[in-house]
Amino acid sequence: SAAEKGGYDWFMRKEIYEQPQAVSDTLLGRFDADRQLTLDEIRIAPAELRSIDKIVIVACGTAYYAGLVAKYAIEHWTRVPCEVEIASEFRYRDPIITPRTLVVTISQSGETADTLMAVRHAREQGAKVIAICNTNGSTIPRESDAVIYTHAGPEIGVASTKGFLTQVTACYLLGLYLAQVRGTKFGDEIATIMAELETMPAKIQQVLDGTEDLHALARELHQVPSVLFLGRHVGYPVALEGALKLKEIAYLHAEGFPAGELKHGPIALVEEGIPVFVVVPPQGRDQLHDKVISNIQEVRARGARTIVLVEEGDAEVEPYADKLIRLPKASTLLQPLLATVPLQIFACEVATLLGHDVDQPRNLAKSVTVE
Ligand code: G6P
C-alpha cells in the first residue's frame, strides 16, 4: 500500500530517499571517542588480521559492484592485494585461498546461494571469512567467522539501492579498520577519512534534493534503444551499477565501461544521439579528471549525447556536456556514494515512464537462493 511505501509510488524510490539515513546508521557507533575504529563484530584477532596477505571479495550483482569500489579503497589504505570476484565464478576455478587469505563476502540478503557456496569453499581452504550483510541472522553471516552488518533497514525493491550505498560504506569501514590494525594508516589519517565519511549523508541528501532535472531527462530519454555509462577508477563500478539499474527495472540495454577502454572497442557503439553518462573524477587527481574530459570530447565528436556527473565548481567540462549533473565535493574514493544516486533515480524514473513494475521486475528475484 501507499502507506507502507511512505507515500512514495515504489519501495525502490522510498529506499533511494532513505539513503542518507541508511549510510548514517551504518557509520553509527563505529568510531569511538578515542578516534579508533571499533568493529566489535570482527572477532578475528588483530594478530591474525596482520598476517593476512591477500583479500578476496566475493559477491553477486550490485553487491559485486560494491566490492569493485571497495578494492580501490582497501588496497589504497592497507596495501594488501585485493581481488574481487563474482561468486558464481569463484569456487569453480580452483582459486588460490590459504589460511592467510581474508575472504570478504557482500550480500544484502545474506541468502544468495552463489555467495554462500563461496563462503563454504573459502572456509574449507582454511581462509577467514568476513560477511558484509544487511540481514540479521541470515545464513551467510551465520556461516562466516565475523560479520559487519549494514544498517540499511529492510530493502524491498528487487533492485538494490540503499543496500549498495551501505555496502560501500561498510567496505570503507573494513578497509580503515584493517589499515588501523596493520598500521598502514594512523589515527589522524583515519580520523580525517572518518570525518569526511560522516559528511556524506548530508551530501547524499543534497543530491536527492536536486533531482527535478533527472525527471525531465528521463522523459527525454526513456525511449532510446541503448545507453552507455563511462567512468574511471571508482567511477567505473559506478558506471556498471548505473547500467545494471537500467537493465533490471527499465529493461533497457545499457553497458558500463572503463572510460579508458573506449578506444579498444566500445567507441564503435557510439552513434548519433546515443546517451552516454560519464562520471568525472574530482579535479587534481593523477590527471584522471582531464583524461575523462578527453573521453567525453571523443564520444561527443561522434554524436553522443553526453550526460556528465561532475562535482560542483568544475567548469572545465561544461563545453562538452549536453547535460550536467552536479555532485557535492568529495574525495575520489568516496565519490561513489554520491555519483550512484542520480543513476538510481534516473533508472527508477525511466522504468516508471515505461509502465514497468519497478519493485518487482520481470524474471528477477530479490534473493536468489538457488545456484
Ligand atoms: C539478486 C538481486 C540483486 C542483488 C543480487 C545479490 O540478483 O536481484 O539486486 O544485487 O541478487 O543479492 P545479495 O542479497 O547477495 O546482495
Image: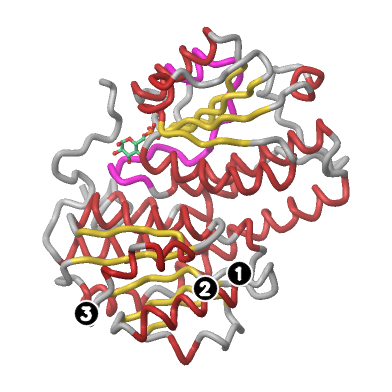
The kind of residue tagged 1 is Leu
The kind of residue tagged 2 is Val
The reply to whether residue 138 is visible in this rendering is no
Give the vertical position of 19 relative to 91 (above or below): below
Q: Earlier in the sequence, mark 3 or mark 1?
A: 3
Q: Position of residue 119 (x, y in %)?
A: 48, 18
Q: Earlier in the sequence, mark 2 or mark 3?
A: 3
Range of residues picked out in magenta: 137-160
**Label 2 CB less than 8 angstroms from ligand 1:** no
Q: Check disc 2: other Cα within 10 Å, few if <14, some if 14-19, many if 20+.
A: many
**Residue at 40% from the left image edge and 59% from the top image edge:** 257
Q: Does the magenta portion include 255?
A: no
Q: Check disc 3: other Cα within 10 Å, few if <14, some if 14-19, many if 20+.
A: few
Give the vertical position of 147 relative to 237 (above or below): above
Where ligand 1 lies, by quadrant?
A: top left
Q: Is residue 56 left or right of residue 348?
A: right
Q: Say which mark, if any, is on residue 220.
A: 3
Residue sitting farthest toward the front:
264
Return the residue at label 1.
288
